[in-house]
Image (tube, helix red, strand yellow):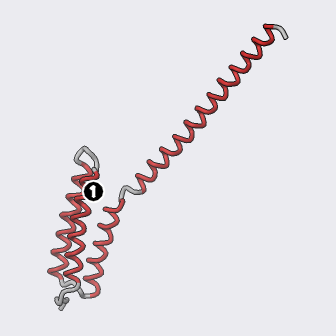
Amino acid sequence: MSRIENGLRGVHALESNEEENTLKRIIIGVVLGALSLGAVAFAQDDKKGRVGQRQENQQQRIDKGVQDGSLNSREAARLEAGEAALDRKIARDKQDGGGFTNREKRQAERRQDNMSKRIHRQRHDKQTQK
């Protein structure tokens, strides 16, 4: 084999490696893009998240307490006002420029824990609707 033929084989091998590397980069790019889109979609689906879901659940618990008579109108109004204040605080935290930080999420969950205890106490006390 001549030197020229060896050189041509080497060039073809390099071109083949470059094509493989380009193909690998494309595949990696597609995979990373798909993963990031999945993460964004998950984040959007989770926008309501745990905090939002708890807000809905607690509202339903208050509504159910009114329906079954375990909450009187004064108790329900107080709980509704507390829920509304909590909702406003969470909305402000989400819009304050830094997003809804982990610290704010923990604080919101703590406030929701307290609200949940209040709902439970009010629904299980001896007061009922008249």
Q: Is residue 53 above or below residue 27?
A: below
Q: Secondary structure at mark 1?
A: helix
Front in this rendered view, residue 50 or 3: 3
Q: Is residue 63 above or below residue 126?
A: above
Front in this rendered view, residue 81 or 122: 122
* Residue located 79% across and 8% down the image: 4
Percent position (x, y) of residue 50? Answer: 34, 62
Residue 61 image-quadrant placement: bottom left
Residue 66 image-quadrant placement: bottom left
Q: Is residue 58 left or right of residue 31?
A: left
* Quadrant of the image containing the C terminus: bottom left
Q: Which residue is mark 1?
A: 105
Front in this rendered view, residue 11 or 99: 11
Q: Amino acid at mark 1?
A: Lys
Q: Is residue 52 left or right of residue 126?
A: right
* Residue located 18% across and 69% down the image: 82
Percent position (x, y) of residue 113? Answer: 24, 69
Residue that extends furthest to the bottom in the rendered view of this protein = 130
Percent position (x, y) of residue 124? Answer: 22, 85
